[in-house]
Amino acid sequence: MTKAKTVSRHNNIGCNNTKDYLFGEYLYFLVNKHIRKMAGKFYSILSDEDMEDLVHDAYLRVCDKRHQYKEGGNFNGWVWTICRNAVYDYADAKREYNEDF
């Protein structure tokens, strides 16, 4: 992970103190874990760069949708759902791209 991506991911959650920074790191860890589990079945069509892009895209989706999380709900399940949708969207886009050729 480059320093630029690390800084940009912390800016996406409004990181301005240690608590926000630690939450951002935990959130990125959780997204990375979920994406790598789910994307395993698509591994044959994913390069390492694709995997990094997919993790980063899912992280940004979680950050963009953080206001939709209902407190008291299953946070892990909520993140899992967003990650799953990111993987499916990526696989669909990849499939459509390959059908064009």
Image (spheres, rainbow, N blue to C red):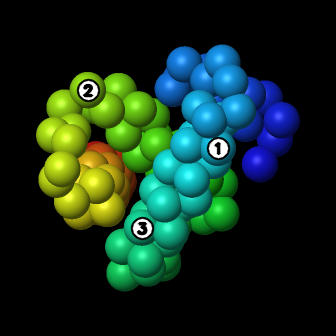
Name the mark nearer the viewer: 1 or 2.
1
Name the mark nearer the viewer: 1 or 3.
1
Residue at disc 1, secondary structure? helix
| Farthest residue, direction right | 3
Q: Is residue 63 left or right of residue 25?
A: left
| Residue visible at 73% across and 28% down in the picture | 7
Q: Disc 1 residue type?
A: Leu
Q: Is residue 81 left or right of residue 5?
A: left
Residue 65 seen in the figure: yes
Out of 38 and 49, give the one closest to the viewer: 38
Q: How many other residues sit within 10 Å of disc 1, few (<14), some (14-19) or many (≥20)?
A: few
> Can you tell which mark lies on residue 34?
3
> Can you tell which mark lies on residue 22?
1
Res 48 → quadrant: bottom right
Number of labels in the image equals 3
Of callouts 1 and 3, the N-terminal one: 1
- CA distance for labels 1 and 2: 18 Å
Above or below 12: residue 55: below
Q: Disc 2 residue type?
A: His
Q: Disc 3 residue type?
A: His
Q: How many other residues sit within 10 Å of disc 2, few (<14), some (14-19) or many (≥20)?
A: few
Residue 50 seen in the figure: no
Above or below 83: residue 4: above
Of callouts 3 and 2, the N-terminal one: 3
List x then y, in percent, for residue 45. Answer: 46, 69
List x then y, in percent, for residue 21. Answer: 66, 35
Residue at disc 2, secondary structure? helix
Q: Is residue 64 left or right of residue 31?
A: left
> Can you tell which mark lies on residue 67?
2
- CA distance for labels 1 and 3: 18 Å
